[in-house]
Every structure is written in structure tokens, then in C-alpha cells.
Amino acid sequence: MLLSDIIKIGKPIVESPMPIIERIQLLTDFGKEEVKNFYGHIFLIEIGRDNTGFQFKQFQDEKNGPVDLKKACGIPITLPSGGNPLHAQGVYPIPCYPMYDPHIKNFTDEKKTKKMVHDRLVRTIPYMDQDEKTLEKKVDLITNMLVNEASKYVTEEKQLGVLVILDLSLNIYSNESKEESLFISTSAMDNGSIYIQSSAIFSNIIEARFLEAAELGSENERVSTISNEPSEKVVSAYNKGWLWLSPTWEMPRSIYWKEKEWTKGIRLNRKEYEAFFYGTQFLKQVQTPLHASMLKEMFAPIQNVEAKKNMRPTSFEAIYGIPYFLPLLNKDSIEVYEKFKVLKNRYEEQNMKESDLQLEIISGVQKRMIPELTDDYRLTIIYYSGTMSRGDIHIRGQIEDVVPSVAYQVQRIIKKNVNTLLNRVADQLSIPENQLQFARFKVSHLPTLLSNAYGPGYIWSMMQAVLHREPIGLERVTKQTSRRINELANKEEYWNLRYELLFYHLFIEFYKQYYETVLKEKEGKLSMQQWESILQRYLNGELQSEDLDSTEKIGFVTGCLLQQFERSYRAKTGKSYVDTRVMRFGSKLTPEMIWKNGLLRMQELQKQWDFGIKSNYNHALSLVLPSMIAMKEKQAFTKEKDEFMTMFWSGYLMLPKVKKEETANESK
């Protein structure tokens, strides 16, 4: 269960020796890019025993500039999730509030400002135990300061800010520096220093979130759903910062529950809820949007080459990837936390080691890696789209319980294909090295590799299969490739056809290595090295009957034959033999057309005209013709059409180009 996993993620972080500023950044929005401009206008109101003071501060050197985190860490804010951000929402851990432009512009309006202040103070933990009369008095003091002092800093341009109430009667503030206390400001009244206890910030944040969860249900002396142990108080799993369980959704809630009875489904005690909150905050830091070019390769249709080519990468909805891992058994929390710290950071590829699990390769999640993860852990990757702040979440895919050693093996196969085989196959297809960037991207990541092979509708199931060491098939891959290359051949787009075959052969190499390395099974598909050997034997006139013992081999040698004959035919007539004699009237090429219109006619034309083709051609033709008859008898022309056609075009385009003098000699 995802909730249980999140709690397991949060526990080692709660117990970790995380530095104060980092912990505040984790638990609040402090330090985030979208919050920095709030710290350009800070309204500090100081309430002493007998008087009040006001200060205006700026923790930004310039507009849109970075925030001085050391100065601002004592006044962290969290932006509202969902609803109207101008209204008071949820529970505030300390009297520190984000101010939007309408709030600041209304500082001149006493009535509106008083309501704004009152609505926030009654929802602030340190003020919740104060009587109404005392609270009302403080609301009046704060309102008076905002109207008379803060309004002087209101401008016509858009302003964002932070309202901070330094009420020295609250035990969270002190004039003395203690262990782990954070300096906020010098006093406007006596020039002394004002500090806040960091422990108060942390405990109040958890208390605030716990109270918010209780809004959808709380019970006393009940058993926790997660630990199955009696607890003094349990609450729902509602979390305003992680709206994967939104109160506005009707579907997850039973029709027999009342609005505040979500604890009938899931109940968390305080300790579990604290870990849950820490876990969700960590996952929000780890989540990464997939690159637009990655999304295009993952979700563009593969049936139509032209349609995919014309699709813009920006036409796809944003999708986020959330990777995480957990130990199978209880491990030292510090060890787990140290690994989490690495996952949270972003890395460039050149800074990663061979032993690192690069999540971009196996999942498409950029700049994230896990160092030397053993099989004592299990990896999970969640993909979702939508806007979390609105509770508009759509889970696209979830790959869970991935054994790290399997992920490492898959990563090594993909890297080997890219680093050693890509240029080799491209060279066979006469594709220049400087034109391989797009093809390299398609085969460098498991999601793009599988989607281009099987189609976007199969991406999650195929990723699940590969990362779980399950068998995968080739029938759909070959069928889709055959359809696309026939479409391209019909339009005479031979360069695009070469790229299709480049991808196909690289996927076959991945498929073969996956079976041999990961599944420990022998797979009958030929490697590129074996095809190169057959091609060399063809050129040397050394083909044997075993070189044509499968439909794919027959197709490959037939492609070589037609290409060799085509070159001599073009040299003599100036026309393409395949285009004018074999693929007539724009019809799609089939094995039977190649046999009847191609191979058999080649014999007749060779008798009529002396093409002077090398002897290796006649030797190969004598082996191919009876093999084609055998294929016809086995109905392989229809049953194994796709296998034949993919390798026919491979042989046709892989036959090395001959020098001009050799072509001239052949055509004499």
C-alpha cells in the first residue's frame, strides 16, 4: 500500500540528524522558488507586555533574487493547497503568514485587515488556548500596526509578503539564544534580540498537520490501521500538502461514511502521521517532471510514421516521476537516510559512476540516481499527471518491487547498446555518425525503447515485465516495424526506412541480451555480428544451406540479391528495378511479389541482358529460389510475412556499396 510505503520513507527522516535549515525546508515551502518573492516584503509586528513595535524587512537583495536563507529560516511559510489562497486555510503552526497582493493592498482598510488577521490567529496553534477576549485585543493591536505602519510600504505594483507576529508572551519566542534557537530580528522596542525555538517550529508543524487530518475524522482509543496497535488518538490520512486523498473526491469514500468519518477507512496515530507527513514532503522533493522529448517518444502513436513526426513534444500533458526505495527488512535508519539524501539531489550524467543506478535510463526520471543499491532494497517508480495543489491527480503507472540487480542489468544492456552497437549497426545501414542524435535518444532510455517497440498503450505493462524479469515477446514489435517500413518504402523514403531498421536491430540486440543476461535463457534471434557474418559469406560466395534455414535469413539474403541486381540494372537502364518492376502501381511490397516480380524476373532479364554480375550472386540465387518455394508451400509468405519483410529491407540496405570501377565492370 502506497500509504504504508510513505510512512516507511518518513520514519528514518524523522529520526535523522538532518540540519535545522534543511528540516525546515523539507516541512514547509521555505526555500522554494515559488516562495522567494514573499520574502521581499516582510512585515514584523512585535507585541510586548506594554507596547508594540513594527519593522519592515527585505530578505531579498533584488526582485526575483535569491532569499537569504539564514535570515529567513525562523519565519517559514507554507502556501495554501487548493481553495482560495486569500482565505485562511488549515492550521498555522506559528504566527507567520503568507500575504498576497490583495491582502497588502487592503492594509489601508481596517475592517478587511482585521478580519484577515482574526481568521488567521484563531487557526494558529500558539493562540488556540487563549480566551476570546485576549485574542481580540491582540487582533486589534496587530490591525492597528498594519493600518498605520505597514500601509506605508504599499505600492501600486504587485506585492507578495510575509506577516510575522512576534508575540513575546508566547513560549515559542525568547530574548535569549538557546541551543538550536533561530535568530529572527532585533527588537523594535529595546534593540534586544528575538529568537524562536526550532523544536517549536517542528512540533507545531506536525501538530498543525495532525489537526488538519482530524477535520476528516478522529477517534480516541482506537487501533491504528498501519501498526495494528491501540493508540490514544487516531486521525484520517488527509494531508493538505499531499492531496492524493482529497476530501472533494466522493469515490474513495464509502456511501455509509459521514463527511468526517474517514477514519473508518484508514486510521493513523500521531507518530505514524508524523512519518507520513515527512514522507510526503520528501517525495515532493524527489518528484521530477519528464522531459517533453521523453513524453513524445513515450506516448506518440507508432503506427503512422508521418503522424508521429509532425507531433510537437509540447502537445503532451506533463507527467511526473516519483522514484523511491525501501529496505526489505528493518535497517539502520541512518543508513537509509543517507541513501535518501543522494536520491534527493540532482546529478549530471558525467558526475555519475558506473555502479550508480541512473534512473533516467531505466525510468526516464532525469538527473536522479541511487548509489550502489543492494538487493536488500526494492525500488518503486510512480508516474502521475495533474496538479497536486488542486487534488487533480491521475496515476499513469506504478512500477513497484523492482530488484536493484535486475535494474542494474537492464541499465548495462542499454548502455552497451548505445556505446558499442549503435554506431556499428548505423555503419551497416550507411547512416552517418553525425545523424544519430535522435536515434540515440530513442534507445538510451527503457521507457522510450519499449514504447517505440510495442506502442504507448503497452509501455507500463512492458516496463513492469522487463523490470520484474518476465518474458517479453517480439511478434508485435516485428509486425509494427514491418508496417512502418512498408509505408516508408511505398513513399520511397529510404533514409527514414534506415532509421526504422536501426531501431529494430538495436531492440533485437536488447531483447537478445535481456534473455541471456537477465532471464538466463537462450534466445534464437541472431545478433548483429551473426548477420554481418552471413553478409560476408554472401559477398564471398560462400553461403551454405544453413544460412537460409529460417524465414528471416531467407529474407535477408533475398534483400542482398535484389540490391546487387538493382545496382547493375540501374547502371544499364538508369532505372530502379525495385520501384519499376517489383513495386508496381504503388502497391505495398510482399514476399510473394518479391518472389514472382523480383527473383523470377531477375533470372529472365539476366538471360536477355548480360549484366556481368559477380559469381556470388548466382550462387546465392541458386540457394534462395528453392527456399522461396519451400516458404510458399509452408504458407510462410503470409504467416511469417513481417519477419521476412523486416530482414529483406535489412539485407537490401546493408549490402555494402561498391566502388565505381567495380560497378562498371559488373555492367559490361
Image (cartoon, helix red, strand yellow):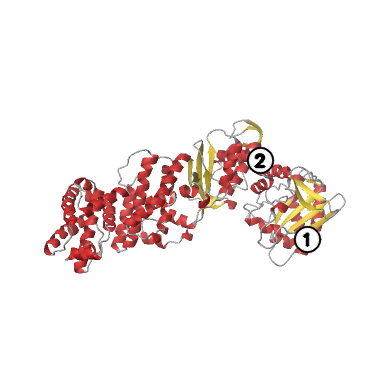
Where on the picture, by quarter, is residue 239? Answer: top right
Residue 584 visible in the picture: no
Q: Which amino acid does label 2 sit on?
A: Pro
Residue 277 position within the rendered picture, expressed as x and y whole percent measured from the top left: 62, 43
Q: Is label 1 or label 2 in front?
A: 2
Mark 1 and mark 2: Cα distance apart in space: 39 Å
Left or right of 252 in this view: 424:
left
Q: Which label sits on residue 397?
A: none
Please tell me which residue lies in front, 255 or 167.
Answer: 167
Please tell me which residue lies in front, 171 or 136.
Answer: 171
Residue 47 position within the rendered picture, expressed as x and y whole percent measured from the top left: 82, 51
Which quadrant of the figure contains the C terminus? bottom left
* Residue that numbered label 2 is attached to: 17
Residue ID at (73%, 66%): 155
Residue ID at (69%, 63%): 62
Which structural element holds mark 1?
helix
Residue 297 visible in the picture: yes
Where on the picture, by quarter, is residue 197? Answer: top right
Q: Badge 2, how many Cα within 10 Å: few under 14, some, many 20+?
A: few
Looking at the image, the residue that sits furthest to the left is 607
Please tell me which residue lies in front, 373 or 59.
Answer: 373
Q: Are marks 1 and 2 in contact (CB under 8 Å)?
A: no
Left or right of 105 in this view: 594:
left
Residue ID at (27%, 49%): 533
User: Which badge, 1 or 2, comes first in the chain's sequence?
Assistant: 2
Which structural element holds mark 2?
loop
Q: Badge 1, how many Cα within 10 Å: few under 14, some, many 20+?
A: many
Q: Which label sits on residue 150?
A: 1
Q: What residue type is labelled 1?
A: Ala
Residue 367 position within the rendered picture, expressed as x and y whole percent measured from the top left: 53, 51
How many numbered discs?
A: 2
